[in-house]
Image (cartoon, grey):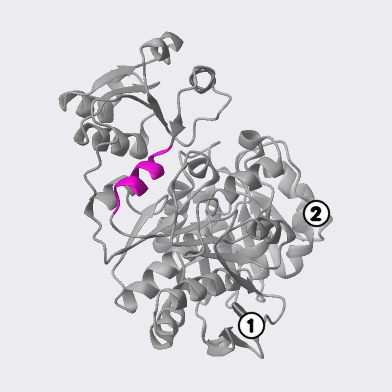
Amino acid sequence: MKRISTYLHKKILVLGLAKSGVGAATLLHKLGAFVTVNDYQPLSRNPEAQKLLEQGITVICGEHPLELLEEGFELVVKNPGIPYHNPMVQKALDLNIPIITEVELAYQISEAPFIGITGTNGKTTTTTLIFEMLKEGNKSPLIAGNIGTVASEVAQMAKAEDNIVIELSSFQLMGTPSFRPKVAILTNIYDAHLDYHGTRLEYAKAKANITKNQTNDDYFIINNDQEIIREIAAKSKAKVIPFSVKKELSSGAYIKDGWISYNGEQIMSTADIRLPGEHNLENVLSAVAAAKITGVSNEAIFKVLNTFKGVKHRLQFVDEVQGRQFYNDSKATNILATKNALFAFDKPTILLAGGLDRGNEFDELIPAFKNVKAVITFGQTAVKLEKVAKEAGIKMIESVDNVGNAVPRAFSLSEPGDVILLSPACASWDQHKTFEERGDIFVEMVHKLK
């Protein structure tokens, strides 16, 4: 860890806790800053804030008082989930107080280079693949960000010979004025988080921050199949490494004659990749590019791709019960993710879907229902999904109270050789705290069946 003096005796406000806020407050305290933490959760129900208080950090809980910002703060470290139209954030901007996220702090104190991954879909799978490839190739990786440990905690442990592989959201990237990954990856851009960013253009700008500080000594791995990403890459100063699932490229990562190829070299046959789904080829190609840049051998890449079954809650193979294969794709909180999951299977599929109603319809799912034999719905969107299933010509459509009840019902409708897939196409917050909780219930019910 670099012992920087940047924050020594500086008055800093950490706005919002959760894991990143705790990590930021603790690190800044170590670096000699005068830290104040402000979190909306009352202190009596806020164990994280209580622990910070015990460390001697000033804690203000239960409200976000605007007058707090008039106390001479020199910096705000914002929880990524707090939008910029929040009154506290707006006032900080009006007072010209710089605002960063915890990832920026992690970068400033890290001795190790970063491999940063962002995009709408595929971030977690790509991050995990790269970590596993670097580990297999003895490249000393550490994993951080939305997957794994808080970045500032990982950075404190990292040595110069390590590689920090970090998954990054658009929210985090908006607060990174100097963050500069050695390798940056932009997997794809689709409409998402527009309630936070306002427009797709603003969302894309946030994603583009991953390469804004890169130089010619760095690498920017991009999805060459998307024009919006090619436009971002055209402004980058890094060495651009393209990947494509649609066509052969003169350089970068691509598929040729059924082989994963990189800069003209055949790495492995796509038939040997264990991870299901054509959409996962994007993740595979970007991970292969990052691994090759970092000096990982083809043998190590092959071993990972030949054995990697997927990340938990992301098209995760759970088990086979009496000839039925169960897959947990609870992370599919949008329509595109569920479409990709359905297209991954050419076997008869029973889809379990439903969740928080954000006001959208689900007509876009209809083309993906080609192999779907039954749909079981739950949650606020149950009626909307039943309507779409009828329009798609599905004969077996049922609604149940929750995902736990959906599993035995799906089993009773299934036959040996079928796939039973949880891929909700919706957020989980109508019935669950997180998509992980929803997926864990599905997995538990599958094990009970067995």
The amino acid marked with disc number 2 is Lys
9 over 419 or under it: above or below: above
Q: Position of residue 214 (x, y in %)?
A: 50, 56
Camera sees residue 150: no
Locate the C terminus and report the quarter of the image it occupies.
Answer: bottom left
- State the residue position of label 2: 390
Q: Nearer the viewer, mark 2 or mark 1?
A: 1
At 26% from the left and 62% from the top, the residue drawn is 160
When asked about the image quadrant of residue 167, the answer is: bottom left
Magenta region: 101-110
| Disc marking residue 255 | 1
Answer whether residue 283 is magenta in the image: no
In what element is the residue under mark 2?
A: helix
Q: Is residue 180 above or below residue 270?
A: above
Q: Disc 1 marks which amino acid?
A: Ile
Which of these two is toward me, 440 or 143? 143
Residue 61 rendering spot, x and y as whole percentages:
34, 17
Residue ID at (41%, 79%) = 304
Bin the neighbour count of mark 1 within 10 Å (Cα to Cα): few under 14, some 14-19, many 20 and up.
Answer: many
In the figure, 33 relative to 411: above or below? above
Mark 2 → mark 1, Cα distance in angstroms: 37 Å
Q: Secondary structure at mark 1?
A: strand
Displayed quadrant of residue 227:
bottom right
- Would residue 95 be found to the left or right of residue 104 on screen? right
Looking at the image, is 24 positioned above or below residue 345? above
Residue at 42%, 8% in the rendered image: 67
Residue 424 location in percent, x, y?
A: 60, 52
The numbered mark, 2 or 1, whose residue comes first in the sequence reads 1
Label 2 crowd bin: few (<14), some (14–19), many (20+), radius 10 Å: some
